[in-house]
Image (tube, rainbow, N blue to C red):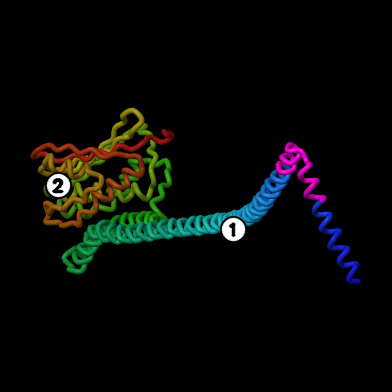
Amino acid sequence: MKNEGVHAVVLNSETADELLAFHDNIPEETLQQIESRESDNVRLQAEKEVAEKQLFINRIFIAALVLVILFLLVLALQFRNNSRQKEIFNSELKEKNRTILEQNHIISQQNEELSEMNQAKNRLFSILSHDLRSPIGSLQQLLELIQSGDFTPEEQSGLLDEMLVQVTGTSSMLHNLLHWANSQLEGDKVTFEEVNIPKKVSRVVDAYYLVAKSKNIKIIQEEPKGLPKIQVDKGHLSVILHNLLSNALKYTIEGKEIKITYAVKNDQVLLKFLDGGQGISEKKIKEIKNLNSRMISQVGTGMETGTGIGLMLVKHFLNINRASLDVKSYRGEGSEFIVAFKKAGIN
């Protein structure tokens, strides 16, 4: 055993010597090539390690990029969902706003209708108090005269005839007023009809017969032939005529006359009330013609008082019936109210 070990050592020593001898015998160029290859191997190994590190970094970057992309996709999907929810919410909000606006519009219309109905009610009471005061007062005077017993049976019969005329005219006026009031409760509606204006005026004159007689005023109405019919709302016309005649009686001096005449001008029929008063000022004429103006009522020649609403109603109804009012004053002789109505059949 010992000999074998010694032998191995001797061999190894010999081998080493041989290798050294071999290395010494290797040419210089070959040694340089071997060293160059070893250097290349080291460099390649280093480059491989760098490449592996770069690959690892690239994989980490790609993984991070994928995560970022996924995160952005999630954000995009969330944003899209939020946008859809926002659009739905905005759409619902717009619909609710539209509904609210419609409801507000309906409420506004209802408020306007209620306001108009309230105004119509006020106008009704004003008209009734204004236009019924004179005929009712006349009837009261007649009854007082009959009750006094100072008249013969023949005179009482005449007074009763006058009362019948007065009651008939007042009843007709009240019927027209109530017809107008009923239409007003449904709004300012105009129902155009063809009307024989002289016939309508005659009925109104009959209603004020006793009022005129109490002031010794004579009402002279022209009886025209072939006068065209006018186009107007009958209820409105009744209010217009009653107020114009009442106004003429109020400012006519006792013992004088009221003249009612007619004329035709182009497509209009003119109705003229000429009273027997003192005339009115230019300032008052402008006030009368102002559609939105409510006049301050003046005391009449018989100390009559008024509310000032009569002419305001006349102007209002003339306006919605496509008619107009003109006023002329003749100082010391009277005032003339000229109403122009549309001829029937004229659009």
Q: Earlier in the sequence, mark 2 or mark 1?
A: 1
Disc number lying in front (2 or 1): 1
Where, quadrant-wise, is the C terminus in this rendering?
top left
Q: Position of residue 133 (x, y in %)?
A: 24, 60
Q: Is residue 335 above or below residue 96?
A: above
Query: Which label was assigned to residue 78?
Result: 1
Q: Position of residue 87 (x, y in %)?
A: 55, 54
Q: Is residue 92 magenta?
A: no
Instruction: Give the amino acid type for the residue marked by disc 1 in the picture.
Output: Gln
Q: Is residue 145 above or below residue 330?
A: below
Query: Which label was assigned to residue 252?
Result: 2
Q: Position of residue 282 (x, y in %)?
A: 13, 39
**Would you say the residues marked 2 and 1 are in contact, meaning their CB atoms lie under 8 Å apart?**
no
Q: Report the magenta stretch's main SS.
A: helix
The residue shown at (30%, 57%) is: 123
Q: Position of residue 279 (x, y in %)?
A: 12, 41
The residue shown at (72%, 46%) is: 38
Asked whether, in this view, residue 67 is left or right of residue 263, the answer is: right
Mark count: 2
Q: Is residue 164 visible in the rendered structure shown here?
A: no
Element assignment for label 1: helix
Asked whether, in this view, residue 7 is left or right of residue 93, the answer is: right
User: Residue 259 sits in which quadrant?
Assistant: top left
- Given residues 76 and 52, the one toward you in this image is 52
Q: Is residue 267 visible in the rendered structure shown here?
A: yes
Query: Which label was assigned to residue 139?
Result: none
